[in-house]
Amino acid sequence: VYGNVGVCTVKDISELDFMSDRKLYYTLQPRYEENRIIYAPVEGHKHKIRPIITKDEAEQFIERLPFIEAGKYANEKERKEAYHEILLSGNMEKWASMIRFIHRKEEERAARGQKVAAHYTEEMKVVERLMLGELAVALGIPVGQMKSYITKKLEPVS
């Protein structure tokens, strides 16, 4: 997983020369953006590169989802700063907390008859894309089926 891009395949590791600076770079192909290539320095890159979670970790995370609380922020400035930190954290629990916060804000605005703020919608799309993309790869499920998979897993057994 690379920064806020999401799940990538490492296509190559090679020495490249960008702006007269020769370094070792990963050549990354985002899993869900076939026409995009990213070159990330092996050392000293600002975005985190980490392995995806395991299938067991993904299943355990989904089981914990109902118990993850919405984020709490003192004000809009704090929320914006937290969003960027959370986005790059690679922490699914923080991602889920942010998604839950945004859903709560949407419900509050709808109850007052207001439109949902566009920045909330965009932020949620990015965080959901990262979370669902990683879960899909870990579980071997198409990303388009992840929301329904999660819903079914969390339905009470009768």
Image (spheres, helix red, strand yellow):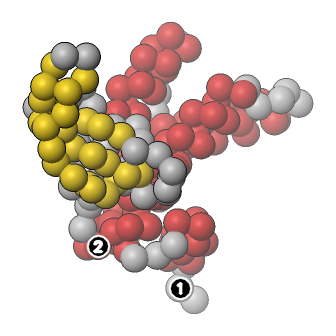
Q: Residues within 10 Å of mark 2 (few under 14, many from 20)?
A: some
Residue at 82%, 35% in the rendered image: 111
Residue at 42%, 58% in the rendered image: 31
Above or below, 136 relative to 125: below
> Where, quadrant-wise, is the C terminus in this rendering?
bottom right
Residue at 49%, 56% in the rendered image: 34
Of 125 and 21, which appears nearest the observer? 21
Above or below, 23 relative to 49: above
Where is residue 3, by image quadrant? Answer: top left
Between disc 1 and disc 2, the foreground one is: 2
Q: Circle 1 sits on which residue?
A: 157
Q: Is residue 56 left or right of residue 134?
A: left
Q: Residue 92 at what x, y percent from top left?
A: 36, 49
Q: What amino acid type is highlighted by mark number 1? A: Val
Q: Residue 5 at what x, y percent from top left?
A: 41, 42
Of 62 and 16, which appears nearest the observer? 16
Of 117 and 9, which appears nearest the observer? 9
Assign a secondary structure to mark 2: helix
Q: Is residue 128 left or right of residue 110?
A: left
